[in-house]
Structure formats: C-alpha cells, structure tokens
Amino acid sequence: MKLHLKIWRQKNAQDPGGFVDYDLDGVSPDSSFLEMLDLLNEELIAKGQEPVAFDHDCREGICGMCSLMINGVPHGQDREPIKQITACQLHMRHFRDGETVVIEPWRARAFPVIKDLIVDRSAFDRIIQAGGYISVSTGSAPEANAIPIGKKDADKAMDAAACIGCGACVAACPNASAMLFVGAKVAQLSYLPQGQIERYDRVVNMVNAMDAEGFGGCTNTGECEAACPKEISLDFIARMNSELIKANLKGGR
Amino acid sequence: MMNIDEIQVAEETLNSAVPKGPIHEKWDQHRFEMKLVSPANRRKFTIIVVGSGLAGASAAASLGEMGYNVHCFFYQDSARRAHSVAAQGGINAAKNYRNDGDSIFRLFYDTVKGGDYRSREANVYRLAQVSNAIIDQCVAQGVPFAREYGGLLANRSFGGAQVSRTFYARGQTGQQLLLGAYQALQRQAHAGTVKLYPRTEMLDLIIINGRAQGIVTRNMVTGELKTYLGDAVVLATGGYGNAYFLSTNAKGSNATAIWRAYKRGAYFANPCFVQIHPTCIPPSGEHQSKLTLMSESLRNDGRIWVPRRAGDTRPPNEIPEEERYYYLEEKYPSFGNLVPRDVASRNAKAVVDAGHGVGELRNGVYLDFKDAIQRLGKEVIKDRYGNLFDMYTSITGEDPYETPMRIYPAVHYTMGGLWVDYNLMSNIPGLFVIGEANFSDHGANRLGASALMQGLADGYFILPYTLANYLAQAGPGDAEMSHSAVKDAQLFVQDKIDKLLSVNGKRSVLHFHRELGKVLWDFVGMARNDEGLRHALKRIPEIRAEFWEDVRVPGSAADLNQSLELAGRVADFLELGELLALDALYRTESCGAHFREESQTEEGEALRDDENFSFVSAWEFTGDDQTPRLHKEPLVFEYVKLSQRSYK
C-alpha cells in the first residue's frame, strides 16, 4: 500500500523544527507502524538523506519506549476495532491505501524534544525517585507468605502496576498533566500492606516532584485514560487525590 | 578468518574457584570465608555497572544500599525499559508452597538436567538456594504477584517441570520484577549512592595493571565520548541473540560490551548455546523487524498440533479431530505439550520442514485453546492469558479465542556468554559479569522461568558478597586518566566510529544485519551439521568484509545518530557470529539447544558425548581474523546422575 507521510523533523532541542512530507510505497499491511518507518528510513538512507529518529526498543508493547503521536492520537490507537495498544503493536492493515498520516513527537513542556520524534521523559524517573517505591533494602524482607494480601487488592495493585511509563497520558492531556502516571504508582503501593508505612509521605513527595517538573494540572477531561495503552483507570487519579487529602489531614510533609 | 583445524587448546584447565565441601554447604561456607569491606570504607570504592535490567538494576541498587559509590550505565532513556521487562511467564523458586514435592535439591536437579548436564553444579545449587529469598524480596518491594483467594501467593507449572514452582504477575512477570528493581534503583539514585547514565552505551573496557578499571562510553544524545574509571566493572548487558537479526530481543539489545571485553581478554564461553523459544508468532513477511514471544505458560492450557496430512491447507476448524497430529502429546506421553523448550522447538521445525506448516506462509504450528476454553470457560482463560491473547490479535489480526494461535520457534535467549568463576568474576580480575551476559547456570538449555531467577540471584544475593571479597583483597584501583590503556581505548573507539562513518558505501546497516541473521538462522540455528557450519564460517567473514567496504552510515558522530549506533553493534555481531559458528562446529556432540544432526538418538533426541565434551568451551581472543584459543573447564558431576534426557 501507499502512504503520504507528514513527519515532524527537528535537528535538536534548539531547532524550531517542522513537518516534512514523504511519499512511501510498497508498505505491507502486515507490517507494524514502526516497520513502516523502518522502510521509510531505508529509502532515505539509500537516497543519502538522514533517517527519521524515533524511540523504540522491545517492539512488543511492554517497554514503553515508543512514543508517536499519529494523526493527533498517542500511539494511533483510534483505529477500530483495535484499541489500547502502543505504536509498535499498531499494524498497517488498519490504514487505508493512499492515506495521509501525520506523525509527531509527544508534545509537553516537561518532555522536551531531543531530535525528530524523540523526547526526553526523564521527568518520570525523577518523580519515581521522589518516592515511588517501598524502602526495603536487599536482604531485609520477611518470608513472602507472612503477609497475606486479598486477591482483590492484589489485582487492583496489578492493574495500576501495569503502567509502562510511555507518557501517552501526558501527550493526550490538554494540560500535559502526569496525574495518571503518578496516580498509578501511588495507587499500586497504597493497596499493598507493604506500602502503608510510607503511604502519606509518598503521595505528597511524588505530587510535589510532578509539579516541579512542569506538568499541568488535572481538569478531569479523561483523555489520559482513553490514550493509555495499558488501560490504566482514571479511578487511580481519584485514589491519589484521596490519598493526598488524607496525607494533608494527617499533616504529611 | 577462523579455522577449525588451527584451534589450539590450552593445557591448563580453567579454575572455577568452586569452594570445597558438600554442595549444600559450599555457599554458606564461602560466605563466611569471603573477605568483607567495612561499611565505613565502602563509599571509597567506585563500581561501574553496565546495564539496568534485572541483573544490573538489582546489583546497582543493592551495592548502593550497602554504601558503595555506584555508576550505572544503560542505552535506554530509562532503566525501567531494559529488556527484562518483556519476560512474560514467571520466576521459579523452591518454596514448595504447593506441597507437591519441590525442594532446593529438586530445583537444582531439574535445572542441571534441563541444561543437559553442561552447567556447573555448584553454581546451580546456589541459584536454587537463593531463589526463595528473591520472592521474599520482590514481595516486600510491592511486586503484585498473583494470589489465591486466601491472600497467599499463587503458583503455576512451567515448561520442563513437574511441580508448580513458578510465581507470576499475570503475563507481565518480567515487567513487575524489573519495576521492583528499578524502583529500588531510583531510591538509591535519590539517596545519591547511585548515579544513572541513561542513553549511554559502553564501547570499550579499560584494563590497567591486569585489572578492569574503567569503560569508554558514548553519550547517545550528544555523541560525546567519555571515560569513567572505577575499582571494578560489572557487565549486566544481556545476551547476543540479536546476532540472528530476527529474535525476541529488543531492537537495541546488543553484545558490544561483552564483545569488547572479549577482545580485551575476557574468555567467551559456550557461544553456540543459543535457546530457540518454541512459542513465538511466525514472521509475516520481509518487513519483519523482530519476533514476538507468546509466553510458554500458554503450553499449560494450549494443545499443539498440525494437520496430519502434509500440505493440508484447510482452515483449522475444518480439520476433523482425527486428522490433527498432536505431535508432542503422541511422542512424549508423560510431558506432552510441556516438554523443554529445545525439544518443543526441534519438533516444530521437524513438522514444518516435513510440509505440515500452517498459516499463509506455511511457517507455523497451531497452539489450540478450544479444549481449555470448553473445560474452564473463556473467563478463566482470559484471566490467565488475556493480555497475551490481545497482543496476538493486534499483531496477526486473528482471535485466538475463536481460531488456534499460530506459533513457531525464534531465537530467544543465549546461555553462552562471558566465562565467570563461582564468584561471577571473569578471568580478568575486577571484571564481573552477571545475568544473561555470563554463561553460568543454564548449561546448554535454560528452563522456563529461570532467567528472571538467575538475573536477580546474581544481582541481589551473589554479586554483593563476591564483589566485596574481591575489593577487600585487591584494594582500591590505581587507574589514572593519563594511563596509556585509557588513551588506547579512547583511540580505538574514536577510530571505529570514524571508520564506520567514512566507508560511505551503498548498502544500509540493516541489509548486512539481515544477511548475517539469515546465515546464522539457516546454518547455526535449531539443527546444525558439519557442512552447514563450515559454510557459515566461510560466509560470515565475507559478509563482514562486504560490510566494511560497502556500508552506508549517514549523519555525524556529534549528534543523536541511530544508524551509527546500529552500525557499531552489527559490526560486533559480524565478528561474534563467526565465533558462534566455530564453537558449534567444534562441539560435535548434541546437547540441549545445541543440536548436531550427526549426534542424535534413534528417537531423534540430542545425543551427548560426555566422554569428550563434558566441559565448558571458553574462547580467548588472539587477534582480528585469527582462530581463537580454547580453554576448557571440565564439568564434574557429583550430585546429579548423568542420563540421556527422556521426556517420554
């Protein structure tokens, strides 16, 4: 199949950047979206041009490295009947022959563009560093079955823990808010007995770190949930807000 | 180019430094005998850790907690993305929570047997011993393992085992364990004991006065080359499966760190032991860039079959039961669909080669859930494998609840890697190698759910002890930036980058990578023979020569340049692939994943030659295009009785 591509090209963080048009022929409907970009890059290299830089690694939807805005939708997941996947799992059979496809990087102040479609998401790491863990040093753990955890809570914790840290939630949000990402980690650890001790400090510290990184506030548009390839629920934002209120009542930092 | 007839075998065998005493006392005794570094002195030691997967992150976090000054380097933008994240099925431990006859000794025994008696007994025993502490540690970190309704941990059985000892977190066990280790690592980054270097790749190892004391790195955003010095270097950079081009590895997974270490003198052990995983989605065409694994836990409930008649192109639901060939269940009545990976892979190849393949390209076999859905209901199957089924649907456009999955083997894991002794130290003092990057515990074939166990065992519970023992004895390093070895490594790295950019040929890096991969897959893949391996040994140096004459690497070195990154990695694979073929040619026996057609039983199983090949092959670099020197580590089995594996 044939495609008209409009791809954001930007030399580096300082460059203003802009769209460049490419026509691509011979795309297999069975190839993935990233394999389509591989094909484009092979053609560019053959023509002596610089290929399009984009982040990718596992190509099986779990590492969270790929980060493409496709026709204005993170990971291009608006194509029926598919939903809730990463760009590496999106296959070209869901596109029309001759379709125009616009490809951009994530857009958010806290995710500056590094080159072309690659952005800097290190803000997420810094938020986790602020408290997204249980402080247990190696060797000091009790026997694993010493503390039973109800299946319901364990399942909810797992639902929240499924986040892959790709940043689609931020890219989808009109405010570039990171509430879903932060909410998922706060919620996961709040459901588990092991997470109780640091529960209130954690939420306060992580929310402060999120604000310091320049992410926007949450106005309940729900775009993040719709864009999340791992179906992380908005309920976790509610959970985080309730944790935060409790923390403030208890005089958390 | 390497020549099988020119191999020189070192007279002295390698010393594995296994402690004396009964196997169940070795590690405890060794822990007592090892030297310690006192808490006050630890921050004076700088440890370089390369890689942030299960092994690297757990090691870096643990060493940071202990008080060492740790630097952790990785090529991804975040440590959370290392490819351990993709492991689906689970992690083994000898907890015996199911009361079904498991024990440390049984986990040890199964692992040695599963590895077809080509692993070091003492290492495997220790692995089984620390397996339980790993589960404790991960639960304490908040890893949401699957649980029973009573709130206690759930288990399942996994390929090659007759007990339920596998812990899991839906189909995302690797992700959850990695996030546990990642969070421990971030906690140390916050505490200032660990400094993280994302988007940074190691391009050379620095050895000064016989000790590994530093690395040369490239910042993948700015292109800046930088040297870091330390008192010890830990490589946790994973395996070399991407040499085959198509594999289940992440696209960025590469062997450059271990290959540079090899070229600086570290021995490379058992490179031909490459695991081909039986349950992956078959390629759909030329565009294929990687293969996706479907966890082998699916084999617990799925039944594998092909049409009994070769060339039968009817859709699966039109093939009546009696015309379906459940080849694993028929050939191996006691293990059925749960035979070890190598056995499952070879049998899939045999039926596809015989014309029974399914799918449009006739390149797969069916994995059918119809019976399980009838028996347990769709909801139970969805609960167990929902995300895997969704992934399958998004890739193939087919619904496995309605029509059987198509699967075929793919390169998945490399049991070979840098040689290490019992202390996980290579033959170069101060160079430690952990996780998939070393060769140690899986012998010629790794059992399912054992990779996560080994990565975390090495990083959490073994390296922190053995590294201290080394530092306590060797003392602080004496490296200085002005040393000639530093300059030498820097020059080498700069020179290689300049060369790659200046060839300015006509063909892309990808072209050469595909070509190498095809040769390795066809001749050094699931079944190998003398003629094919000799062909590969001739062909790989030719591809390498063409690469250096005709590769085109666009862009500059002073910038983010993904073509340049790939070019450096493929250049190394083009060398490593040759060693892989040489090792496979030298080992004329079959064992585990290494199947030499010349050496098989009447039933078509791998036939070992214990008399002549009960050793680890450790190769020493002797110069570019030279035949490497072979060192042997004899394998002695005192506790496990060697037998012909039989899963009938």
Image (cartoon, helix red, strand yellow):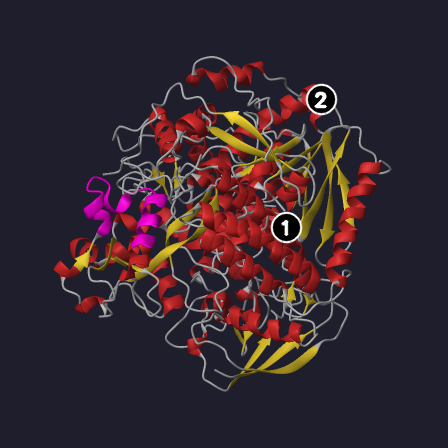
Work out whether residue A123 can be spotted: no
Label 2 secondary element = helix
Dots 1 and 2: beta carbons under 8 Å?
no
Q: What mark, if any, has residue B494 been given in the picture?
A: none
Q: Amino acid at mark 1?
A: Asp
Q: Amino acid at mark 2?
A: Ala
Local crowd at mark 2 within 10 Å, few (<14), some, or many (≥20)? some
**How many tags in the picture?**
2
Q: Position of residue A187 (x, y in %)?
A: 46, 52
Work out whether residue B482 can be spotted: yes
| Disc 1: host chain | B
Label 1 secondary element = helix
Q: Position of residue B161 (x, y in %)?
A: 30, 37
Which residue is the site of mark 2?
A: B474
Q: Nearer the viewer, residue A162 or B365?
A: B365
Mark 2 or mark 1, which is nearer the start of the sequence? 2
Which residue is the site of mark 1?
A: B572
Which secondary structure dominates the residues rendered in magenta?
Answer: helix
Quarter of the figure that contains the C terminus of chain B: top left
Q: Position of residue B508 (x, y in %)?
A: 63, 66
- The residue range painted magenta reads B327-350
- Locate residue B218 relative to residue B62 in the image: left or right: right
Depicted B562 relative to depicted B336: above or below:
below
